Structure formats: C-alpha cells, structure tokens
Amino acid sequence: MTHFHSIRPWLICSVLLSLSGCAVLTESQIEETNRFAKATDGFAALPGAVIDHQASFEKNLRLLEMSNQVLPGHHEGTEEGNIKEARTQAVEKVHKQYLAAQEFYALFKKDQARLEQSLQFINTYTKGLKTLIATDDIDELNKQAESLGNSLDKAVDQLKTLGIKTKEGTDLGIVGSATAGAVRGIGGLVLSYHQARYVKEFTAAYHPHIEAADKAITKMMTTLASRKETNDRAITSFLQTHFVTYHHLTTSTVLATDQQTQINNNIATSAQAVITASNALVKAHNSLVDELKTRHTLKTTIETITVLAGHVEAGLALKQKLDKAS
C-alpha cells in the first residue's frame, strides 16, 4: 500500500493545479447530480431486504419439512425396547432439524448485516451530494466534504469484508480524507469553485467503490436467484411426502405451501431486479462522472439516471410485495 506521506503531497498538488482551471458547475450539472442522488434513494436497502426474505423463507421451508416427521408406532412382533429407541431417535431428529433451520436463518442474517453495513457508504454519498450542491455556506460545504471523505475511508474495509476489492492501483482509503483536506486547504470564500471541485473529486473517487459494491451485490443476488429451482423441488417433495405420510392434504397445508411457492418466486424476481438496478447505478454514475468534466448538456446522464430511477422504483415495489407476503 502506498504510504500516506508519499501520496498526500502529490494529491494536494494535483487538486491545487486542477482547481486553478476549475469552472463552476452548470445548472444542468447541478440538476442532474441532484437527480442522481434522489434516484438512488432507497437503493442501498434493496439487497439486504432480499436476503432477509430469503432467510425467512429458507427457515420456514425447513420447519414445514419437520411436520412430515411421525413417531414410530407399535407393530406386531416389535419389542417395546426397540420402539422406545426408535422414538427417541425420531425426537432427536426433529430437534436437530429445528436447530438446523435456526442456524441456517442466522447465517443468512449475518450476510444481510454484513452487506447492509458495507452499502451504507452509498447513503452517505448521495446525501452528501445533495448537501454539496444545495448549501450556500462554505463551512457547511467543508463539513459535508469531511464527512464524505471519512465515509470513503471506511468503505474500503467494509467492501473487503465482502471479498470485493476496488480496481488495481487505487488507494482510496487515503484519497477520501486527503481530497477533502486538499480542497479545503486552498482557502478563499469562492463557494461555487469549492463546490465544483468537491463534487467532481468525490464523484470520481467514489466510483470504484460503487463498482465494487455492484460486484458484491451481483454475486450475492445471483446466488439467491439460483436457489429458486432447488427450493421449488423441495416444496414439491414436501407436499408429496406429506400426502404419503398422512394420506390427505389439509386446506391449511396446501395454502401454506402455495404461499411459500409465491414467496420463492418473488425472491428470485426481486434478486434479478436488484442486479438490474445495481448495474444501472454504475452506468448512471459513470455517465455523471464523465459528463461533469464538460460543460455540455448531460444528455447521456439524463437518460441513464431516468433508467436508474425506474429500476430502483421497481425494486422498491417488489420489496413492498415481499413485505406484505411475509
């Protein structure tokens, strides 16, 4: 890793030099930056919500399977001691199945917590962008930039817990706080120039993290979606075994099984929707980064943010559907 003392002077000089030719943000740049931040509202909660519902579904499916267990009965010629031993084993099996269902649930919840914590930087970032382009107070501007820098520093370690690294050659754990300090250290009261530099520097600095988060989200959601067919077979197997065991199916059993089937379908659909929204987030943010470098109308960014907003809204709608079904 590059040492702080070696990178900070270079970074500060770079920011100082670039600021001298830094234009203020155009109205369209401010508008689309704000629109991007608003379009992203609620996105960070979507992946964790899918894992949460998957956790409950997987646990409930295993609890349903427990209902197919029966105690061994008395049969002619069977010794009492053997029956007692068989029943003891059956009770132990049910207990183990129950504990396994709870442990499986806990594993999913652990992954959910890890992912949600790692994606917190997205909320901090989009909230920070809104403040950067809205404030007319330079002290508040610097304060928000400091918060963005600290959030960027933390994001590095959080993303590493997901097994995802940022692009080679980036040392963003230092760039976050150093960027804020470098721009603030220039001094002066020309807020619009500070605003422009903060927005451009932080959108560029955050982009590799957004790409890294997208990789983690895509990997996890793909894994969840791939479980649909396996779980469909498990549901079918449960019904068949239940019918063979009890020789009939109650209305409550059929309805409970159908509900689990619908939840399984909705989880897979939601997982795919989150992947689509995450990919759209990367594309929209990449367009924003590129077009903040120019003073032209942000046509491409306008289009990609519109697409992003639609996918995030679709993801939120599916989340509400799962919430109601659970």
Image (cartoon, helix red, strand yellow):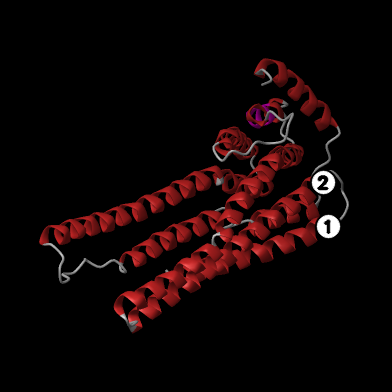
Question: Could you tell me which residue is drawn at 67 percent across and 45 percent down?
Answer: 210
Question: Could you tell me which residue is drawn at 66 percent across and 17 percent down?
Answer: 3
Closer to the camera in the image, 135 or 255:
255
Q: In this view, does 169 lie to the left or right of 264?
A: right
Q: Which amino acid does label 2 sit on?
A: Asp
Residue 135 visible in the snapshot = no
Give the vertical position of 79 relative to 104 (above or below): below
Please state the extent of the stretch shown in magenta in the rendering.
176-181
Quarter of the view holding residue 318: bottom right
Q: Which amino acid does label 1 sit on?
A: Thr
Residue at far left of view:
80
Give the structural element (helix, strand or loop) at label 2.
Answer: helix
Residue 245 visible in the snapshot = yes
Q: Main secondary structure of the magenta part?
A: helix
Quarter of the view holding residue 247: bottom left
Q: Which of marks 2 and 1 is nearer the N terminus?
A: 2
Residue 86 drawn at (x, y percent): 21, 59
Residue 119 drawn at (x, y percent): 56, 46
Q: Which residue was labeled with disc 1?
A: 300
Quarter of the view holding residue 169: top right
- Tell me, yes or no, whether the highlighted magenta stretch contains residue 178: yes
Q: In this view, does 41 lie to the left or right of 6?
A: left
Callouts 2 and 1 close, C-beta under 8 Å: yes
Question: Could you tell me which residue is drawn at 40 percent across and 64 percent down?
Answer: 61
Q: Which residue was labeled with disc 2?
A: 290
Q: Distance between the residues labelled 2 and 1?
A: 10 Å
Quadrant containing the N terminus in the rendered view: top right
Closer to the camera in the image, 168 or 142:
168
Residue 313 drawn at (x, y percent): 62, 66
